[in-house]
Amino acid sequence: EVQLVESGGGLVQAGGSLRLSCAASGFTFDDYAIGWFRQAPGKEREGVSCISSSDERTYYADSVWGRFTISSDNAKNTVYLQMNSLKPEDTAVYYCVAGEGPREVFLQGIVDYWGKGTLVTVSS
């Protein structure tokens, strides 16, 4: 059974930091790109970041560039999203996703697997 299990969400003040984790199982981790999407209340889902497990190519949304860092620990089948300088507009449910490649996942939104999401709330 494929599973993407997110953790690390919570409530933080503006300017603070959080680190999200995504533990993957049930598929060959190195064959997939793992990424993060988010959906804020009343807004469309958007891609935040993505990393290729094989060559560590990364993609970031312009809105998080320079503040968020995605990384992968292939030995643990886990991807992390370090979020610094958080803003109230970062408030959303963050979903871990997996797909064939980082371009397909991040640029085309072609996703094979979704996690259930973790809520990040940034207070002003």
Image (cartoon, rainbow, N blue to C red):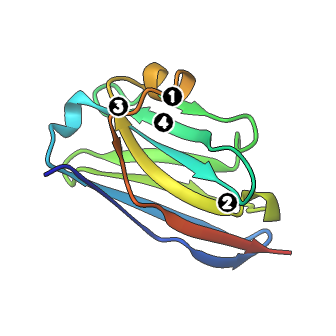
- Report how far apart the C-alphas of labels 2 and 1 lie in the structure: 25 Å
Q: The disc labelled 2 sits on which kind of residue? A: Asn
- Looking at marks 2 and 1 on the same chain, the residue that comes earlier in the sequence is marked by 2
- Looking at marks 2 and 3 on the same chain, the residue that comes earlier in the sequence is marked by 2
- Looking at marks 4 and 2 on the same chain, the residue that comes earlier in the sequence is marked by 4
In the picture of the structure, the residue carrying the numbered disc 1 is: 109
Quarter placement of the C terminus: bottom right
- Report how far apart the C-alphas of labels 4 and 1 lie in the structure: 11 Å
Q: Residues within 10 Å of mark 3 (few under 14, many from 20)?
A: many
In the picture of the structure, the residue carrying the numbered disc 2 is: 84
Closer to the camera in the image, 73 or 37: 37
Q: Secondary structure at mark 2?
A: loop
Q: The disc labelled 4 sits on which kind of residue? A: Cys
- On screen, residue 120 versus residue 95, left or right, reads right
Closer to the camera in the image, 24 or 55: 24
In the picture of the structure, the residue carrying the numbered disc 4 is: 50
